[in-house]
Image (tube, coloured by chain):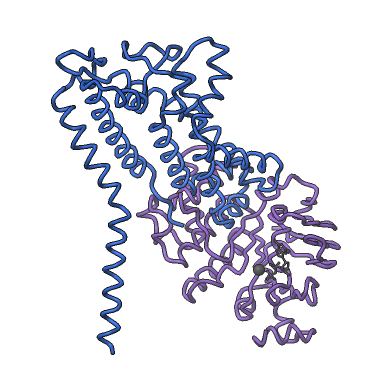
Amino acid sequence: MSYGIAVEVKNLNVSIAGKPILKDVNVKIPESTITAIMGPSGSGKTTLLRVLNRLIDLIEGVEVKGSVKIFGRNILETDPYEVRRMSGMVFQIPNPFPHLSIYDNVALGAKINGIAKSKRELDELVKWALEKAMLWDEVKDRLRDPPWKLSGGQQQRLCLARALALKPRLLLLDEPTANIDPVNTLKIEEALRNLKKEEDMTIILVTHMPHQAIRISDYIIMLYEGVVVEVGPTEEIAINPKHELTSRFLRGEM
Amino acid sequence: MPNWRSLKSNVFIVLVVILALIAIAPVFHIIIYITLRGLPVILEAGIEFFISTPAAVIAEKPGGIAPAIVGTLFMTTMATIIAVPIAVLAATFSAEYPNHIITKAVRATSRSLLEVATILVGMLVFALIVLPLGRFTGLAGAIALAIVMIPYVYTYTELALLSVPKTYIEAGYSIGLKKAQVIYLVTLRIARRGVMRGVTIGVAKAMGETAPLLFTAFGARNVIFGGPLEPMDAIPLMIFQFIQTGFENWNKLAWGGAFVLLVLYLTLFIISRRIVREVRV
Ligand SMILES: Nc1ncnc2c1ncn2[C@@H]1O[C@H](COP(=O)(O)OP(=O)(O)O)[C@@H](O)[C@H]1O
Ligand SMILES: [Mg+2]
């Protein structure tokens, strides 16, 4: 367990159709930690997250400058398909593939990327991912069901399992609990904590629930209009925010 | 006052129902009329109707329309095999690159093909295939039907692909899928019902066409199946030609054929709904 740097962003500038979205972002995220990205809507949180798995490339007219290293590799100079295999992503609105069964939702990425070689390995991987997403007990008897038979919260945990099946060292979550109930929110938070502890995963989580950030994160990155206004350990920031915006945000005033 | 209002709304509902009935009445009229004229012919002719060639005009029994049935099944199947991959590929390209010059060209072509009289399609294939080959062939008929079919499959498929929510495409990329894999394993699968709708309508359209076959397959009724490089009959072609004659036997075959076509349509729509489940998003 060497706690090196998982993500290192230097002088990152992102613009879409000439409009600057992220301005000179510099952050270092240590391995095996949970980092919360916070900030008002439109501040560039999603954009920052999508740079990390190059999903940003899907947007037309986007320009990315600077350097982004993930586990030492400059991902801006790596084939985007390879970059995406390095991390898993969970989206704001649960989006399990509607045409695939619960099992296949988890298995698809592993199959395509050759992570499981045999049917048995695949079965084990799917089970592992669903267990880690704290969903296994609820779905083990109906793995062939379509995902729409699950509740919204279960669907989001299925999406977490889908991301985990790639066996990523880095996990990206974009407001994963913004659209689900409190019980499921706590389950996902527990799953994230366990993934950090047991699997040494590095987790980056966009959230606009201050309590969530305080509950589970080790570090907080505060974004405002594309600029990192504050970054540091959660305990420090929660007790003694340096920036006016941060304290207002933590008090729930934004 | 409340009574007056509920009376008004009742009158309105009755009016809507009556208008709806008027709107769909022609469909029932066609179905009933064709059944009344066609079914007795088939019942009278028996199995002969499906396995024989048409009898002479003065014969005691009308014989059958086997060449037309076989021809329609053959040419429609061939046309589907030709048209669907081309149309789906083109639609995939259009959905992926909506502003590309090729997309614009394909869209314009497709739109004009939907509007142009299908006899022109027949004449085009006549010039491109029948003339160089020196003969009418079932193959040329199939190609003409494929051209009729393509714009329907293309239009429906493109629409279905574009209506797939972006978030599933992003999820596909996020688990490391390549572009082609996202299209094939995610987008097309989610859009499958829409694609199938296009294929069904395209096939139905092609199956009922006469005009594109006049100068291509031409029609041949003395053998049941002469091969793809021989002239070939089709049910609508046979109906079109037989109904114009004054011979009772041939008139009967035309009505029987219309009934067979009707049954083929219903089968097509039922099967296509059964084999592809809707994806709930
Ligand atoms: N596809 C896009 N095209 C144009 N502008 C975009 C696009 N996506 C995001 N933006 C802009 O980038 C800014 C940051 O957006 P986003 O990263 O989604 O913010 P957040 O996730 O913090 O709400 C917003 O001003 C938004 O309008
Ligand atoms: Mg966002």
Determine the residue positioned at 31% across, 14% down. Answer: B224
Above or below residue A192? Residue B121 is above
Quadrant into which the N terminus of chain A falls: bottom right
Chain A appears in which tint?
purple
Output the letter for the chain in blue. Answer: B
Q: Answer above or below: position of B64 versus A97.
A: above
Residue that appears at 49% across and 42% down: A121
Horizontal side, residue B78 vs residue A236: left or right = left
* Observer-nearest of B91 and B201: B201
Question: Count the marks: how many?
Answer: 0
Q: Horizontal placement of B78 versus A22: left or right?
A: left
x, y percentage for residue B26?
Answer: 29, 48
Task: Residue lying at the far bottom in this picture: please name it.
Answer: B1
Ligand 1 quadrant in view: bottom right
User: Could you say where residue B13 lies in the image, as x and y percent from the top left?
Assistant: 29, 70
Q: Vertical placement of A158 versus B45: above or below?
A: below
Query: Observer-nearest residue: A4 or B261?
Result: B261
Quarter of the picture containing the C terminus of chain A is: bottom right
- Name the one closer to the observer, A155 or A193: A155
In the rendered view, tell whether residue A14 sits above or below residue A217.
Answer: above
Q: Which of the 4 quarters of the picture holds residue B92? A: top right
Q: Position of residue A64 (x, y in %)?
A: 81, 57
Snapshot quadrant of residue A212: bottom right
x 72%, y 86%: residue = A247
**Left or right: B233 with respect to A1?**
left
Q: Quadrant of residue A44?
A: bottom right
Q: Position of residue A135 (x, y in %)?
A: 45, 61
